[in-house]
Structure formats: structure tokens, C-alpha cells
Image: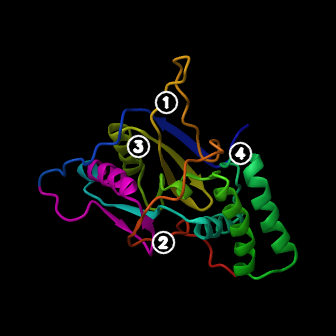
Amino acid sequence: MTLVGLVVAVVMAADVPAMARPGPGLRGPAWIARGNIELTPELRTAIDAVARVYREKTKRRLEVTSGYRPAPRQAAAMYAKLKAGGSLAIYRNRRLVDPIIAAYREGRRKKWKREKVIAAMTEVLTAQVARGEHISRHLEGRAFDVRSVGLSKGQRAALMAALAEVGGMRVIHESKPPHYHIEILRRARPSSEGAGDEDKGEGDAGRGEGTPPDSDKGRGTDDPEDAPTPD
């Protein structure tokens, strides 16, 4: 199936290094966050690594727009995407995504206010997480978003090169609203027959592991960048 508006790149490597050294003459943070996002230690480590390599290549900071999302924040982000006319085709586990879309459509059909629609979507997501099912790596603290608006062709290429150099991540360029969604991949785990388990993409894994991770808050916006003002 063709995913309209999505460009997917997979970068396979070992583990994300703790830190990439800044280049000569570069001072201050290698990335900035917008609004009030939440970041786990694992996310901070990954962002630090990518941002430092990116800054060496471009002399620019990355803008991080989203990190760990508990269910209410994930529901709000999905609401914003649907309201902007975007598709949830990125979430390929239809068993999980269809009830969320149904809650959104019911609320819109009944002309509920934004908060009530998001609450209905949150209820669906909360029940899924309680069963150990995570439709998005944001819910597990293993995905972050980077601003793509305003990046030149060379800067976009530098970001892809930084991700390849750091390794262990998958990037998806989403167009509605525009941003780079970056996932931290698990190392393949050997099975009893010696074959590794594939680390699947957004929404594929279905059953997650345990409860949401501990997180600390940074400066950033949890909704995807350039989302329309909600009604």
C-alpha cells in the first residue's frame, strides 16, 4: 500500500551512542525544544547524539517539537493531524487505529467541542495502553519529532546523514502537518530458532512492554508543528 505524503527511511546500526562531540567553535545546546514537551532519558540521549552531529554539519540547532506522549497528548496530536486533513495511514495496525478514528468521527458528527473529542480518543488509547498495546512509539518514550519547515535541501540531507551516522533509528517525513518523526529502534532479539525479531514501524508492534517510562519535561510543543489552531 502506498502511504501518501510519507517518506520512510530506515537506518540500522547497533545502539545509539551516549553523545556525539560538538565540532570546534560550537557552543551552547545543539538543539532546542518548543513548548512543553516531555523527554525520557533515552530520548535525550538520542536527540543529543543526532543534534550534535547535525550541528557539526550545518552550524544549526535542531528544533524538537514532540517527545514522550501519555495518552491525552497522543490523542491531541492525532486529533490535530486528522483536523488538518492528514491521514493516519502511518499507523498500520488497523485493529488499534480504527477505534481511535471512530471516536474522532463520532465526536465530529455530533459536533462535540475539541476537548470532548480528544477525551473520547484518549479513552480508547488509555484502554489500549492498559492492555500493553502502544499504537505509537511516542507512547513508549521511543520517538521524537523534529521541525522540517524552513529546512533547505542541504539541511535535510545533513539531518539524514546525522541519523545514519548515529544509527539505530527510523525516520518518517510526514506532510500533514510537516515534520520528521524519528523512532528509536530496538535491537533484534534472538528467537529460540536463532532468527531475530524485526523491530517494526509506527503502530506495527501492537503489544508494548510495561508501563510508560519515567520522563522529565523540556521546552517544546507536543502537537506537531504548524498544526492549525483548534476550534
1 or 4: tag closer to the N-terminus: 4
Q: In percent of the image, x 70 and y 73: which residue is there?
A: 118
> For this rendering, which residue is in front, 127 or 114?
127
Q: Amino acid at mark 1?
A: Arg
Instruction: Measure the C-alpha gap from mark 3 to mark 2.
Output: 23 Å
Q: Which mark is residue 93?
A: 4
Residue under the point 67% across and 49% down:
91
Earlier in the chain: of badge 2 and badge 4, it is 4
| Disc nearer the start of the sequence (1/2) | 1
User: In the image, is 166 to the left or to the right of 180?
Assistant: left
Which residue type carries mark 2? Thr
What residue does disc 3 label? 160
Q: Could you give the CA–CA distance between mark 3 and mark 4, rounded to whole angstroms?
A: 26 Å
Q: In the figure, 202 relative to 175: above or below?
A: above
Give the amino acid at mark 3. Answer: Met
What is the x, y in percent for residue 146?
45, 58
Residue 69 lies left or right of residue 105; in this view the side is: left
Q: Residue at label 2? A: 221
